[in-house]
Amino acid sequence: MRFIGSKVNLLEDIREMIKNNCTGATSFCDIFSGTTNVARFFKKDFAITSNDLLHFSFVLQKATIENNIKPNFSSLKKNKIDDPLKYLNEFEPKIEDLKSEPFIFNNYTPNHNHDRSYFSKDNALKIDFIRQKIEEWKNDKLIEENEYYYLIACLIEAVPFVSNIAGTFGAYLKHWDKRAFKKIELKHFEIINNGKQNKSFNKDSNILITELKGDILYIDPPYNSRQYLPNYHVLETISKYDNPEIYGKTGLRPYNEVKSKYCVKGKVLDEFSKLIKNANFKYIIVSYSSEGLMSEEEITNVLTENGIKSTYMLKKIPYRRYKHTKGEVKHSLNEFLFFITKR
């Protein structure tokens, strides 16, 4: 899944920083988990705590971080459904197969009320059918909590591959991309068993931090003024399936409750300072962009005020170069990796 600020390309740099500086660490907290790529990567080495304010991220965490084995779906098997993904993939739903109004079909495919072209009609109806069937199984006590989140996560992971978008759900394409006409297909996750008790949360990071303690705290906050929810609102609605009062050209759901202060220039530094001050962790690693709302100096000051100055370090990783049309370098864009041992 494409995600704004994804740290897939920094995983080895983060691992090297941990290897060289985090002696004796056994636990790792990813407090802005997003797509869970960082938490999943380090799960084999540490007991993981993960968190994100967005519900679809929480669902992905519940499926891949809290689970150490694939769910068994024993109650479904008693009802002759050996593999729910196979069952859901093979079922070709019609409108009459749905138990309630098909929210995705009604609101994110073109009709006489709007032109929203996020999904083909077949895929939108299938998404509604799958999501409603998962809810039905839960209400009928045919799936356990971990199985419930696992199935929703499989759906969330599959949706972007049949979405008529350029990268995020902030807008749909004016013309149909051919991938939007592929049949949606649910696939099983590769689950890492670290033999440890891992925990996932769906909370404001600055509230959650007061409830946690551990060895390594990895912080990857939003770095610019773009709130995340408008770019992933369709996934959030599929995840919650709560029939929100949507509005606007893109069918945006209300998101005041998930607005992040880390995306507000006048609030981000104070919010970050509180997070670091309240962190009951031995080691702190921060990812940030050189074009972020906080400056390198501001982040450094917060870390050194709350940590052991002699342990502070900063690694600058260039990952893109912007150029004028004539070809000369305009400026470089760096990913910052900060490290400090907490006092």
Image (tube, rainbow, N blue to C red):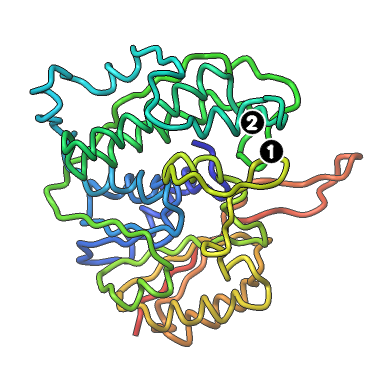
Indicate the quadrant where residue 268 lies: bottom right
Read off the residue under disc 1.
Answer: 171
* Type of amino acid at the residue the image marks with label 1: Ala
Query: Seen in the image, is 103 located left or right of residue 189?
Result: right
Q: Which residue is mark 2?
A: 165
Q: Residue at x 59, y 78 (%)?
A: 269
Residue 149, position in %: x, y? 29, 42
Please name the amino acid that badge 2 sits on: Ile
Indicate the position of residue 260 as horizontal and vertical percent values: 56, 66
Where disc 2 sits, the SS reads loop
Q: Is residue 23 above or below residue 137?
A: below
* Residue at image location 61% in from the left, 39% down from the top: 169
Query: In the displayed structure, would residue 67 be above or below residue 163?
Result: below
Report the front residue among 39 and 326. 39
| Residue in the picture at 53% in, 48% down | 244
Q: Nearer the viewer, residue 304 or 85?
A: 85
Is disc 2 in contact with disc 1, using a CB cutoff of under 8 Å? yes
Is 55 on the left or on the right of 289, as rendered?
left
On screen, 23 above or below 89? below
Q: Give the crowd class for mark 1: few <14, some 14-19, many >=20 residues within 10 Å.
A: many
